[in-house]
Amino acid sequence: MALPHPYRCSRPVAFWIVGLALHLRHATPSRPGALPGGARAATLCGTRIRVPFDTPPPRRPRSADITARCPQCAEFAAEHDYLLLTWDF
């Protein structure tokens, strides 16, 4: 999946990710790969989560089956018209 171009997208972009040791997706405006694994990233709801580490191929990311989303992030994204993408590391 290609990332949207940051200067050509007419809407703000956020990515649904699962932080380390979490079982819920949060939306973050930090682009995948912008922060190293283990770094703290801000989310739309104000929570700071730890960025997961990349999953080496051919393994499948453990977060791939997690679909539960933070309701506060979803509400903020809807109010501010974010383009939301699901991303697994």
Image (cartoon, helix red, strand yellow):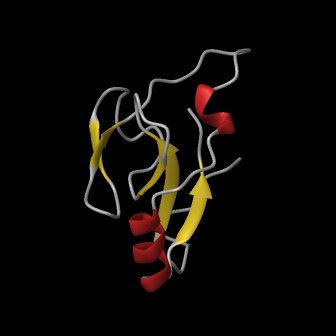
Q: Position of residue 69 (x, y in %)?
A: 53, 56
21 left or right of 41 in image: right
10 left or right of 40 in image: right
Where 24 falls versus 63 (above or below)? Answer: below
Where 75 falls versus 65 (above or below)? Answer: below
Q: Residue at x 38, y 27 (%)?
A: 37
Look at the image and tell me whether residue 72 can be seen: yes
Q: Quadrant of the C terminus?
A: top right
Q: Position of residue 1 (x, y in %)?
A: 71, 47
Q: Residue at x 39, y 67 (%)?
A: 72
Q: How many marks?
A: 0
Q: Position of residue 74 (x, y in %)?
A: 48, 69
Look at the image and tell me whether residue 4 can be seen: no
28 left or right of 40 in image: right
Where 68 falls versus 84 (above or below)? Answer: above
Foreground residue among 79 and 6: 79
- Residue 38: image quadrant is top left
- Residue 33: image quadrant is top left
Q: Residue at x 46, y 65 (%)?
A: 71
Q: Position of residue 75 (x, y in %)?
A: 44, 75
